[in-house]
Structure formats: structure tokens, C-alpha cells
Amino acid sequence: MNINILKKAYILLVCLFALNYSCKNDKDYTATIKNEKATPLALLEDDYKNKLNKCIVALETLENATSFETALSSYKDARNHFKGIEPILAFVDKNNYMSLNAPNILKIEEDDATDIKIKKPFGFQVIEETLHEEPLDLIFVAKIAEKTKNRLKLIEQNTHIKLKDYHVIWLIRDQISRVALTGITGFDSPVLEASLTEAQLGYSTIESILNLYAENFSDKKLLDQWNSEIMASTEMLKGDFNEFDRYTFIKNHTHQQLELLNKTVEDWDVEFPFELAFKNNMPSLFSNDTFNIDFYADYIEVDSLKQKKQQLGKTLFNDKKLSANNTMSCATCHKQELAFTDGLKIFPKQKRNTPTLTYAALQQSFFYDGRTGNLEGQIVDVVNNVNEFHSDLSNLHEVIKTDSTYFKAFNRLYSNGVNDANIRNAIAVYVRSLNKFNSKFDNNINNLEQTITESEINGFNLFMGKAKCATCHFAPVFNGTVPPNFTETEFELLGVPKSTNLPAIADTDLGRYDVFKTEQRKHFFKTPTVRNISKTAPYMHNGAYNDLETLMDFYNNGGGTGLGLEFEYQTLPPDSLNLQPNEIKDIIAFMNSLEDKQPKS
């Protein structure tokens, strides 16, 4: 079965289990209001439905708008109500939320070659962009508004919220993270850049929820701290989008809120049934304790064995005996000193540039074309590749089985000893350990050191704001896996040329198209991490750009379209970002600050 189907099934089961699991200390709230005092959950659902209904009414008004001014006013009204319900809707109905808040590009779902869905986008981002297109087409705006309204009506008719205390914690944590990682970047307000105002609405909902659950707090001062912190955050969010200091906001407010959330878990005596992508006690967005690495794998590793498996995997990773001619190991193409790349434009006889393995585990697709859904699958592809290991799993099995050291190690760590699955798992466990989160940037935003420069901070703020880098390279990993759920890794069409020579010639690599032959996926490639980018030149899938300066110039001028190339589905906006030379310099300084610190030998 396709690995993406398995993951979706797992996520569905997790959600169903979450909604039915009862922690021993949780209060089983019911949304039924009779003659008795309304429960917090009943009040939460009532407020949610009221805002949902107001959003529907505003969209109905938008459908009948006769001018740009009235249409825009109705849109803003609807959008604000939508943002008010976002924390709840995004948690209890993720799929509908993502559809309603989707970017204005085709949605392609490719579970396998026999199940490919191409969906035209609708929802708030589509309305926002359509409203600002010339000439204005109010008939089309009304059509999208109607479809958006009908989806919200369907949600309204089927709303029955049932949350345990730990769900409320998760819901709040997701919204705090959503604001910091996508909200303040302009990710879902592409034209109006109303992200800061919309973030305030999200915080208002968090504040309401916490105060509805006031009786849960044994420490009333903790609730007071929450209210004060949200007030301070809201006040800071009243700034200008391009001038907003995102670095300080995350350092002084987002991380403070995560600390308060951990105190709330303790105060409410909450027990969690499991962990999702974020660890339940995550201390920050940029920490080695932020992510539950098992969420990205196919099964949970036993902690007591993990370190020994990592060491075994590292040995296998560096062992040339595993290739058919004993001349190549994984480390041949993935050199540790180059952040596990090779420094080449393209390795001999390969099709694409060698990607970094650092933070590779924190994504849902592998290879530039996303043809495998987990690290173990990626290893199979490498082993079988005639121009890499030129081997197969059975041969790999025999080589390792005849090595007494390997044989003993596998028998100690795996109940069924040496087999194909365990060999792949050992290497994958090692690769999953290559997420350090100890760069200069990480250490400074976590208050572990005070060495970051004004240029680097400004670069981060530009990356997350005006330059719109973070609308594709999502923090904290700065790759294409979308927070806060991290269930989907995005692909983009940037219009990368064959080389930097002018006039530009389009690269002939069709990328994702080659996997399922979906016409609308030609030239799409997975969005990689920019962590350790200082060590991973040359850049892009074809190594076309030798340095960050020319790469940033490509982005700044509208990608392939800016070079005069034609790509119908280019996802990078064709308009110039209008970044000044000093701003590009700052962005590069920030990206260089994401280099992992290596242990002293």
C-alpha cells in the first residue's frame, strides 16, 4: 500500500482516538445546555457557532456586492470572523480548514497512479487575490464566495464539539505555533498582508477559551499571567507588517506562551495519550526537544535502543562494502563536513544535486520529486540505483550477515536479527538523529547565547515577512513541511533555468511529473530546508546557482517568469519582491546563521 495512504490512515485513527480517549483526570464536558449552568465546552461551541454564522452572513453580503469597496468590506468582515474561529476549526476539522484557507493554486492529490485528484482552489485566499485582479470580476468573486459560504454552512450543520482537557491544550498550542510560523509571515494574506491583525483575532479566541476554562486553574495567578501575556502580544501585533520584529515576538512572546502552556498542563493535571508532531512539553519552536521524531517514522523506537541503533546505522552509512564494487558508501555523496551533501553540481551519473540529510527526517516526502514517503523507502531506491550502490537488498543482507560484528549487533538490537527491514531501519534511525537545532540562530532565540547580529535579526524578519521566503520554507525547519500539523510537504514550481547564462533556457527536468505523469506537476520540486545552506552549495535541484547572492537575485526578480520563461503553474509570484541590496545581504546573513555547530573533536 502507498505509504501516504498509510500515514493518512494513521492520522485519522489518531484523531478518532483523541476524540474518544478519556484521561483519568479529565472532565468529560458536554455541549448540552439545559436548565443547569452551561459548561465551558458548551459556551465555547456556542461562541464558535455564532462567529461561524456571522462569517456566512458576511459572505452572503459579498455575493451581492456591486463595487470593489463594498466587496472588500464584506470580505474583510467574513475573513475576520473566520480568523476568530480558526483556532477551533483548524483543530476539530483540519481538512475543511485547509480547503477554506488554501492558497490560490491548484490542489493536486496523488495517493497513487490510480487515484489522482486535481482540485480548483476556493476559500478566503482565492477571494482576496481575485478581488485585487484587474479587471475586477465580481461575478467570479460571487461564485467563489458562494462555494466558500456553502462549505461553512455544511460545517455549521455538522458541528458538535467534544474536547477533553488535553485537546484544549493541543488546540491552544497549535494556534500559538500557527501564528508564529505562518500567521505573521503573510502566508494566508497574500495581498492585504493583514496577518498581524488576524493574529490578534486568534489570540482573542485563545484568551476566551482560557477564561471559559477558568475553573480548571488551581493557580489563579497562572490565568492572570496568560491574560497579561496575551494582552502584551496583542499590543505588539499592532505594528506594520514589513517593520514587524518577528524575532523578538517569537523570542519574548511565543516562547513565553509555550512556557505558560507547560505550566498549565501541570496545573490542570493533564495526561496525554500520545504525541503528535510537536512534543507535548515542547519548550520552544527551535529546539531539539520541539519535535516528536517518531511522528515522521512508521513506528515508535524504543528509547533504550535508539542510541545504539544510531551508532549501528552510522557505521553502515560509512561502509563501502555495502555497494556492489566496494567503492561507495552513503557518505560518498553525503559528506558530514558539507552538511551531508557533496559540494558538486550533480554527482557523476546522477540526475540531480545531492540534498542535505540534516533535518531530512522532518518531512513527509523524500527525493526532489517526492517519490518515496519515508527514509526506509529512500534507502531502497539508493541501494537499487545502478549508478549508486548498484546492489539490491538481498545482496546487502548477505554482506551484513557474513560480518560477525554486524551479525551480533543486529541480534542484540532487533528481535529478528539481520533482515532487509532492520538494515534500512538502522540507517534511517541514524539519519533521524541529524537534527541538532544548535545553530547560532537557535541558541540566540532560545537565550542560550547573545551573539546574534542586527543584520541576522533583520534577515530573519525579512525572511519571515517582506521577502516571503517563509511562505514556502516554513520555520522552524525552514523546509516545505507545513506547520503546525506537519502532515504535508509542499512542492513548488519556481521556474529554475538550466544555468545562469542569459538568455535563460528552461531546465528540462520535469520533477514531480515523472512520478505520476500529472500534467499540472511538470517542473515541480520539493521545497528543501535552508538550514546549513552555508555548506550546501551549489543550489537548486540542478545545482544551477553557485552562491546565495545569485540565487536571491533569481527569487527577487520573480523566478523563471522574471527571466522571460513561461510556466503556466509557477507558484513563485512573478512580481519583484523589491528587496534592496542591503536587505538581500541581511537575509543571507540570517540563512548563514542556521549552520549547525559541530561537536569539538
Image (cartoon, rainbow, N blue to C red):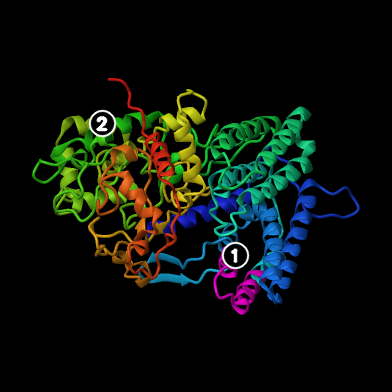
Residue 158 sits in quarter: bottom right
Bounds of the magenta span? 125-149
- What secondary structure characterizes most of the magenta part? helix
| Vertical arrangement, residue 536 with respect to residue 337, above or below | below
Apparent side of residue 347 relative to residue 495 in the rendered image (left or right): left
Residue at the far left in the pictured view: 325
Residue at the far bottom in the pictured view: 139
Numbered disc 1: secondary structure: helix
- Density class for disc 1 (Cα within 10 Å; few <14, some 14-19, many ≥20) is many
Measured as percent of width and height from the top left, residue 225 is found at 72, 31
The amino acid beneath tag 2 is: Ala
Residue toward you, 338 or 371: 338
- Residue tagged by mark 1? 128
- Residue tagged by mark 2? 409
Question: Residue at the spot x=14%, y=37% of the render?
Answer: 402
Task: Calculate the distance from the C-alpha at mark 1 to the C-alpha at mark 2.
Answer: 58 Å
Apparent side of residue 233 relative to residue 338 in the rendered image (left or right): right
The label nearer to you, 1 versus 2, is 1
Q: Is residue 569 visible?
A: yes
Task: Classify the position of the N terminus by image quarter.
Answer: bottom left
Measured as percent of width and height from the top left, residue 431 is found at 32, 39
The amino acid beneath tag 1 is: Glu
Measured as percent of width and height from the top left, residue 69 is found at 69, 68
| Vertical arrangement, residue 76 with respect to residue 580, above or below | below
User: Is 173 included in the stretch rendered in magenta?
Assistant: no
Apparent side of residue 37 relative to residue 133 in the rendered image (left or right): right
User: Is 148 included in the stretch rendered in magenta?
Assistant: yes
| Vertical arrangement, residue 69 with respect to residue 369, above or below | below
- Density class for disc 2 (Cα within 10 Å; few <14, some 14-19, many ≥20) is some
